[in-house]
Amino acid sequence: MDLDEVGRHAESLPDVQRKGTEARPGWVIRDRLVARLHDPQTLAIRVLLDEREALLDSHPDIFGVLPRMEAHHKVEAYLDQADPAAVCAAIDLAWESQRR
């Protein structure tokens, strides 16, 4: 999956806007994080902890969590290994939790 695909999907969701820089874009809804590019191949996605665990269990090769991020409601998606459907589903979870 590439960044253009991420952007097209995120921006197709109601009220999601692209913010950030060209090198480190992010997508937000009402200034609440949905996803942000961490580095060229790593996308941080805001998901609730129980949803994060389900993503990690079902797609351990696509998603991960750095030890310093374990307490945060985020998961990393490794775009160079990603199944687009799984990443889009995670972005949808983030959008759903942040639009409330």
Image (tube, rainbow, N blue to C red):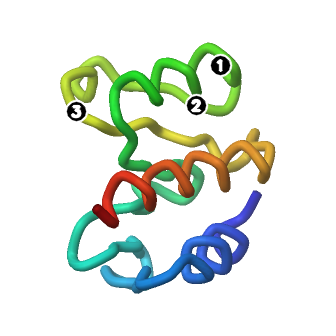
Give how far across and how far down residue 23 sits, in percent. Answer: 43, 76
Among the two numbered marks 1 and 3 on one chain, the one whose residue lies closer to the N terminus? 1
Between the residue at mark 3 and the residue at mark 2, the CA separation in whole angstroms equals 15 Å
Question: The C terminus lies in which quarter of the figure?
Answer: bottom left
Q: CA distance from mark 2 to mark 1?
A: 5 Å
Q: Is residue 62 above or below residue 44?
A: above
Number of on-image labels? 3
User: Under tag 2, what secondary structure?
Assistant: strand
Q: Quadrant of the N terminus?
A: bottom right
Residue 36 % position (x, y): 40, 62
Identify the residue at horizontal 41%, vertical 84% (top origin): 15
Proximity of marks 3 and 2: CB atoms separated by less than 8 Å: no
Q: Quadrant of residue 22?
A: bottom left
Report which residue position mark 2 lands on. Answer: 63
Report the side of 82 relative to 17 (left or right). right
- The residue pinned by badge 1 equals 60
How packed mark 2 is, by other alpha carbons closer than 10 Å (few <14, some 14-19, many 20 or more), is: many
Q: Residue at x 40, y 85 (%)?
A: 17
- Is 57 or 26 nearer to us in this picture? 57
Badge 2 amino acid: Phe
Residue shown at 40%/22% (left/top)? 50
Could you tell me if the residues under marks 2 and 1 are in contact, i.e. CB atoms within 8 Å?
yes
> Residue at label 3?
72
Q: Which callout, 3 or 2, points at the residue further toward the start of the chain?
A: 2
The 10 Å Cα crowd at callout 3, few under 14, some 14 to 19, many 20 or more, is few
Which residue shows up at 56% across the image and 72% down it?
A: 10
Identity, as a three-letter code, of the amino acid under mark 1: Pro
**Residue in front for this viewpoint, 40 or 56:** 56
Residue 33, placed above or below residue 70: below
Look at the numbered discs 1 and 3 and tell me whether their residues touch, using CB distance below 8 Å. no
Looking at this rendering, what residue extends furthest in the front direction? 100
